[in-house]
Amino acid sequence: MSARTLSILATALLLAGCGQSDTPPAAESQSSSAPAPALRGGGTFAKFAPDGAATVYNAELLPAGSAAEAVVTAADTGVRTELKVTGLLPNRAYGAHAHVKPCGEKGDAAGPHFQDKADPVTPSVDPAYANAKNEIWLDFTTDATGGATATSTVDWKLTDRKPASVVIHEKATQTHAGHAGTAGARLGCIILK
């Protein structure tokens, strides 16, 4: 072959290597991406309705138009829960926790806090059980617009026993014996599904 023929072949091979293929590239593995949510819920707070997503119990502290969204994600390393709120009172501390039952007409319908290792005594105020490692605590302080995001990460896993709601409370969660886990009145509740 002549040098000219070799040069033309080399150029053709080079261009073919840089060209686009009709075969699409292999899809990227989804296993390395974030796990899908195990539970989620939220909406704009309103009076209780059997099919409602977000129930308000105190419209002064959860004013009209306020909303919340929670996402619970389970992974091999544990459970991550994120709560986002908007339209609440500005620059104010609130408590929030995952609860064992769905929201109801009254705040106590959601039952006690969801615990990995359930306290045999109810209400649970023993810091050995009522703590941020055994429960999902999502306390937050709103910004000047009434918005906030809170995150909880625990190292245990969800089983067939899962939280059914997130309740927002009137004040930050207490941690001392006899009051551990308490956070005042239940202001609102969102259903987790």
Image: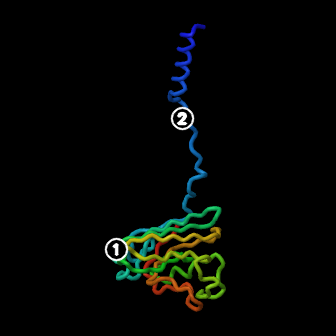
Spot occupied by residue 176 in the image (x, y as percentages of width and height): 57, 89
Say what amino acid the circle numbered 2 marks. Answer: Pro
Whether the residues at callouts 2 and 1 have beta carbons within 8 Å, the answer is: no
The crowd level at tag 1 (other Cα within 10 Å; few <14, some 14-19, many 20+) is: few
Q: Which residue appears at 34% of the width and 72% of the height? A: 145
Q: Earlier in the sequence, mark 2 or mark 1?
A: 2
Q: Residue placed farthest to the front in the image?
A: 3
Q: Quadrant of residue 164?
A: bottom right
Say what amino acid the circle numbered 1 marks. Answer: Ala
Give the distance between the C-alpha atoms of the residues marked 2 and 1, in whole angstroms.
49 Å
- Colouring chosen for the image of the structure: rainbow
**Pointer 2: what residue?**
24
Tell me the SS state at disc 1. loop
Spot occupied by residue 62 in the image (x, y as percentages of width and height): 38, 78
Quarter of the figure with the N terminus: top right
Report the mark closest to the observer, 2 or 1.
1
Spot occupied by residue 67 in the image (x, y as percentages of width and height): 39, 71
Tell me the SS state at disc 2. loop
Q: Quadrant of residue 91?
A: bottom left
Residue 52 visible, this angle: no
Q: Residue placed farthest to the bottom in the image?
A: 178
Q: Which mark is residue 121?
A: none
Total marks shown come to 2
Residue 24 visible, this angle: yes
**Pointer 1: what residue?**
144
Q: Which residue appears at 54% of the width and 71% of the height? A: 152
Relative depth, front residue between 13 and 133? 13
Q: Is residue 61 left or right of residue 124?
A: left
Vertically, is 28 above or below 131? above
Vertically, is 3 above or below 157? above
Q: Is residue 76 left or right of residue 180?
A: right
Q: Which residue appears at 53% of the width and 68% of the height? A: 81
